Image (tube, grey):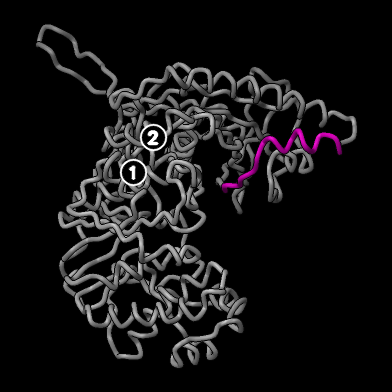
């Protein structure tokens, strides 16, 4: 079985164009991690690319493919259809294969029981209103579709197979499928809707297999709704290999701050040489990579307990504390300057000016220090895998936490209302009026540009308590006082809540996490505590 990947750039520049990711650097980080993990678990790996892709992936990044084949001339006229290059790759295979997308991370081998099957895909998709509405937007413009597929779409009974992985041993079927896909593409090259790629790659694949009474074997046994892909299921770097050995960064997940940061950290930890090779590609034009600041917005949970209060010595009032969950929202902080003119002269105006001044100062400080940041594997705090939660539960003394040295917190002098927050973020939804929100400014892992997140009072207390560093157990004891948690069950609940917050703050690059290692030197010398980087790898 051959394991193959495809990257066609269509005359785009891999060091400039993001290809749907947060940045071009994130795109190449993902490609490196995908390729290197694939090569680790499957040795027969092949790349199909163009001249520019070969130059970057093979010549510069030194990704360990057994063979790289350049297919420039076959794809240039398909530049509108990103899936067409994959169809070409499918069609030229002469041996059984599984194609693995460049946004897929395999932490262990694809089971032999699956790789021996005739037709293989990632999972079946339940085509609901999302796909039906998307296809309906261009269905009347189609000049050709196989009759069986037309009938299925009109009846609303069509299926789809996600092509994160796709292939099999039935090469004759795959060639027929590829040929039919190009009939659809060539007859409908006027279609510009992005969902058209899904139609001729995934929906056609499922339709033809069903028409020929052929079974499709899937890596993920569950059928997933067409719009039912969530990052906690497919891109959760805190899960182990046993619970999530397969990751697929689909669609908008490619622009998710947490996911992109975790991919960079994972690549740096497991493959530091390749991480540095990627950084080297961007070292000469780092100023072009500065992105608009993004904000992670925090919403109250659906069922809030009765709030407790905590008397912060730095405040003059009792501040209510609520457990919260995090929902990511993105917006450019530069919108503040553009919108200030429409605000009446009031305290919001003054508060936003103060915030903008604070943000400018912190951003300049982060970027000024970026050139001096040393990238050393043993010095970069890193955590991946579910081991942190298990260790916190079983050995809370062994986890040592400290606020990152590049973190600043801004709390406005009064609670910002919805209108004020709308100037900082887009797509604002309701906030809990009882919760005080602050903004944390940390450094992105790759380039030290500012990473902004909204935090609540409990998060700020955690960061304050950890300013000098302390074991997790000591932190939970301090937080138990906030919640007046006296009995054992209440303390366990607080411990779980704080563990979730620690994970969230780590994702926001606000915390460094270490493990306390006890070293026995001699019988005459007392036990000495030393700090060791906590490296929870998948499967640990």
Q: For the residues marked 1 and 2, what is the alpha-carbon distance in whole angstroms?
A: 9 Å
For label 1, count other residues whose C-alpha is less than 10 Å away and answer few (under 14), some (14-19) or many (20+): some
In the rendered view, does 54 fall on the left or right side of 143?
left
Residue 103: x %, y % from top left: 37, 54
- Against 236, residue 522 (above or below) is above
The magenta segment: 327-342
Instruction: Tell me if residue 307 is in the magenta stretch.
Output: no
Q: Quadrant of residue 310?
A: top right
Residue at image location 73% in from the left, 20% down from the top: 316
Instruction: Tell me if residue 330 is in the magenta stretch.
Output: yes
Let me know if residue 190 appears in the view. Answer: yes
The residue indicated by pointer 2 is 281
Q: Nearer the viewer, residue 399 or 201?
A: 201
For label 2, count other residues whose C-alpha is less than 10 Å away and answer few (under 14), some (14-19) or many (20+): some
Q: Nearer the viewer, residue 532 or 72?
A: 72
The residue indicated by pointer 1 is 56
Residue 77: x %, y % from top left: 45, 66
């Amino acid at each position: 079985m051959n394991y193959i990947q495809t990257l066609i750039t269509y005359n785009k520049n891999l060091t400039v164009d993001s290809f749907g990711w947060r940045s071009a650097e994130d795109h190449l980080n993902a490609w490196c991690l995908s390729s290197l993990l694939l090569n680790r678990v499957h040795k027969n790996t092949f790349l199909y690319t163009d001249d520019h892709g070969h130059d970057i992936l093979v010549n510069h990044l030194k990704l360990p493919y057994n063979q790289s084949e350049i297919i420039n001339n076959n794809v240039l006229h398909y530049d509108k259809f990103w899936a067409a290059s994959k169809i070409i790759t499918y069609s030229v295979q002469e041996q059984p294969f599984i194609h693995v997308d460049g946004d897929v991370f395999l932490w262990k081998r694809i089971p032999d029981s699956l790789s021996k099957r005739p037709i293989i895909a990632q999972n079946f998709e339940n085509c609901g209103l999302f796909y039906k509405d998307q296809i309906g937007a261009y269905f009347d413009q189609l000049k050709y579709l196989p009759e069986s597929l037309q009938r299925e779409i009109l009846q609303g009974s069509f299926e789809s197979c996600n092509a994160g992985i796709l292939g099999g041993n039935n090469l004759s079927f795959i060639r027929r499928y590829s040929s039919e896909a190009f009939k659809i593409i060539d007859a409908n090259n006027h279609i510009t809707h992005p969902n058209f790629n899904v139609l001729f790659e995934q929906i056609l694949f499922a339709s033809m297999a069903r028409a020929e009474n052929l079974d499709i074997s899937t890596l993920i046994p569950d059928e997933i709704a067409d719009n039912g892909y969530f990052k906690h299921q497919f891109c959760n770097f805190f899960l182990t290999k046993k619970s999530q050995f397969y990751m697929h960064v689909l669609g908008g997940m490619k622009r998710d701050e947490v996911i992109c940061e975790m991919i960079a950290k994972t690549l740096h930890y497991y493959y530091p040489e390749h991480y540095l090779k990627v950084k080297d590609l961007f070292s000469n034009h780092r100023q072009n990579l500065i992105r608009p600041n993004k904000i992670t917005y925090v919403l109250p949970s659906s069922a809030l307990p009765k709030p407790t209060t905590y008397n912060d010595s730095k405040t003059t009032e009792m501040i209510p504390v609520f457990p919260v969950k995090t929902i990511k929202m993105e917006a450019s902080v530069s919108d503040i300057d553009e919108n200030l003119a429409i605000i009446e002269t009031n305290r919001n105006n003054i508060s936003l000016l103060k915030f903008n001044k604070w943000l400018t100062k912190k951003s300049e400080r982060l970027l000024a220090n970026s050139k001096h940041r040393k990238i050393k594997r043993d010095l970069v705090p890193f955590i991946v895998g579910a081991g942190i939660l298990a260790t916190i539960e079983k050995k809370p003394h062994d986890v040592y936490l400290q606020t990152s040295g590049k973190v600043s917190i801004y709390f406005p002098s009064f609670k910002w209302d919805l209108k004020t927050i709308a100037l900082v973020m887009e797509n604002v939804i309701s906030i809990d009026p009882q919760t005080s929100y602050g903004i944390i400014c940390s450094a992105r892992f790759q380039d030290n540009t500012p990473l902004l997140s909204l935090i609540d009072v409990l998060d700020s207390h955690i960061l304050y308590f950890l300013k000098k560093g302390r074991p997790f157990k000591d932190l939970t004891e301090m937080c138990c006082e906030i919640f007046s948690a006296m009995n054992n069950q209440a303390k366990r609940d607080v411990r779980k809540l704080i563990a979730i917050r620690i994970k969230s703050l780590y994702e926001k690059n606000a915390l460094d996490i270490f493990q306390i290692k006890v070293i026995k030197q001699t019988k005459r010398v007392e036990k000495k505590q030393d700090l060791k980087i906590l490296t929870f790898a998948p499967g640990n």
